[in-house]
Image (spheres, rainbow, N blue to C red):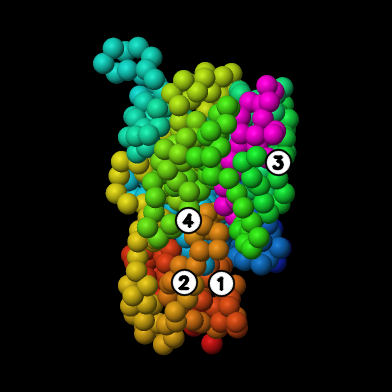
């Protein structure tokens, strides 16, 4: 609002604030809002203007304060999603979007946002293979896979295999592997929804090769081996390995869930795609946004003819990934270590040294803590970590900041665990806690 407008507003006769309230179009034309309109769009700014004008009409703010009120009400970004510092101690946190992308993947997303050659051969000008570079990178990362394909998430990868291979036929699966994968979705419901019939073998805690042998018949499409990645059964248990299952006269499909492509020294019990394929699995399905550290997608790795059959199956088109996913996946596979990989590679000593430095800046305590992989990976595995201990009453105020800081309360203390916090965010973390401390003390 110009100085002249403010002067006129101040001299409007009468006490009714509605008479002094400026028009919507005049407020929208204020130069102070030009950047916000360009960044957030006119509709979003107009909505904020409407709210400020309502307050002005009610007398809550003066006409001179309308534009400042609009600026204060506008979001900092053109999305309702807010940046979060993950101090929960869970490396792959599903509620925080699972794996954070590497800098390389983030840069790839920016490039892919515009027109790209995702399905065009620039040399010939003819149509090219969609996402060829990303698929080549995935094949290079798992040389034991004769064929590779990518769909929009891990459940879609398994659903495609079931739909293409087992519609009207049966899938043999151990009862102890009929898992629920989150938000109420269950593997058996997923498989039967695409027309497959399940033949359950064994008991909840024990299954033998003989159980599978007795269940396999001419109607069997494949044997499914599901890694129970979000729980662990201990005690009187037995399972059948992929190598043993591969002796059966039908293909073995291994759903690994967490997306580990190669064995990991810190997660020796977590199955990986390379080992599963070498053991005899005809097809491996997994997620791309967990231990791989990439974008949400589903990976299909295995026998070339089988993967090609799945790729050409009509349902595959409904599960196709977009250019953003392909770009981020390629950068994840070919670029520097991902944040997930870096978190798992950080030693407890390094984390404790950082925690002491952060705690010292805040006058708080640094403590040894226990972290987890999360995201349906490595259930029961405890990762040695370190955290800063704070007043538990600060948990909610920290979550309300921008960026939000999310920790976890353990035995009456708010712990800000550093295993999933990049060192570059330590100063941001300190400043956030200081802001809350000033407000709460």
Which residue is found at the position 67% from the left and 30% from the top? 216
**Label at residue 201:** 3
- The residue identified by callout 1 is 408
Going from the N terminus, do you reach mark 2 or mark 4 first?
Answer: 4
The answer to whether the residues at label 1 and label 2 have Cβ atoms under 8 Å apart is yes
Q: Residues within 10 Å of mark 3 (few under 14, many from 20)?
A: many
Tell me how far mark 1 sits from mark 2, CA to CA.
8 Å
**Label at residue 120:** none
Q: Position of residue 280 (x, y in %)?
A: 47, 35
Compare residues 419 and 35 and report the one nearer the observer. Answer: 419
Tell me how far mark 4 sits from mark 3, CA to CA.
24 Å
Part of the protein shown in magenta? 211-230
Compare residues 30 and 379 and report the one nearer the observer. Answer: 379
Tell me how far mark 3 sits from mark 2, CA to CA.
42 Å
Q: Position of residue 390 (x, y in %)?
A: 51, 82
322 with respect to 338 (left or right): right
| Residue 376 visible at all | yes
Q: Position of residue 435 (x, y in %)?
A: 47, 77
Compare residues 89 and 406 and report the one nearer the observer. Answer: 89
Going from the N terminus, do you reach mark 1 or mark 3 first?
Answer: 3
The answer to whether the residues at label 3 and label 2 have Cβ atoms under 8 Å apart is no
Compare residues 181 and 176 and report the one nearer the observer. Answer: 176
The answer to whether the residues at label 1 and label 4 have Cβ atoms under 8 Å apart is no
């Amino acid at each position: 609002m110009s100085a002249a407008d403010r002067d006129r507003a101040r001299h409007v006769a009468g006490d009714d604030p509605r008479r002094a309230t400026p028009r919507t179009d005049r407020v929208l034309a204020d130069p102070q809002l030009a950047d916000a309109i360009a960044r957030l769009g006119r509709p979003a700014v107009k909505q904020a203007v409407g709210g400020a004008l309502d307050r002005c009409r009610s007398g809550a703010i003066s006409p001179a304060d309308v534009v400042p009120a609009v600026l204060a009400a506008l979001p900092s970004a053109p999305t309702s999603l807010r940046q979060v510092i993950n101090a929960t101690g869970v490396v792959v946190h599903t509620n925080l979007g699972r794996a954070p992308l590497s800098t390389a993947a983030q840069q790839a997303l920016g490039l892919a946002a515009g027109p790209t050659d995702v399905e065009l051969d620039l040399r010939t000008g003819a149509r090219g293979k969609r996402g060829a570079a990303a698929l080549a990178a995935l094949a290079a990362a798992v040389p034991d896979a004769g064929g590779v394909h990518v769909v929009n998430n891990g459940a879609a990868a398994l659903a495609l295999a079931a739909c293409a291979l087992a519609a009207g036929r049966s899938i043999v699966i151990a009862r102890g592997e009929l898992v629920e994968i989150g938000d109420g979705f269950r593997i058996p419901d997923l498989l039967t929804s695409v027309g497959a019939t399940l033949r359950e073998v064994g008991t909840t805690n024990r299954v033998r090769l003989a159980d599978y042998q007795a269940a396999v018949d001419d109607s069997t499409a494949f044997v499914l081996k599901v890694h129970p990645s979000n729980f662990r059964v201990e005690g009187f248990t037995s399972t059948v390995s992929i190598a043993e299952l591969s002796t059966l006269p039908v293909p073995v499909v291994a759903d690994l869930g967490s997306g580990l492509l190669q064995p990991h020294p810190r997660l020796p019990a977590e199955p990986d795609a390379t080992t599963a394929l070498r053991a005899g699995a005809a097809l491996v399905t997994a997620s791309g946004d967990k231990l791989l550290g990439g974008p949400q997608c589903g990976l299909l790795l295995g026998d070339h003819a089988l993967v090609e059959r799945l790729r050409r199956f009509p349902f595959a088109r409904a599960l196709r990934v977009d250019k953003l996913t392909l770009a981020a996946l390629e950068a994840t596979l070919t670029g520097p270590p991902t944040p997930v990989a870096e978190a798992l590679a950080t030693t407890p000593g390094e984390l404790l040294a950082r925690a002491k430095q952060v705690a010292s800046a805040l006058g708080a305590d640094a403590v040894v803590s226990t972290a987890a992989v999360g995201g349906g990976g490595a259930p029961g595995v405890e990762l040695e970590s370190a955290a800063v201990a704070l007043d538990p009453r600060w948990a909610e105020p920290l979550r309300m900041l921008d960026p939000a800081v999310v920790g976890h309360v353990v035995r009456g203390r708010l712990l800000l665990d550093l295993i999933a916090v990049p060192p570059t965010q330590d100063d941001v973390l300190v400043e956030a806690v200081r802001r809350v401390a000033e407000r709460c003390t």
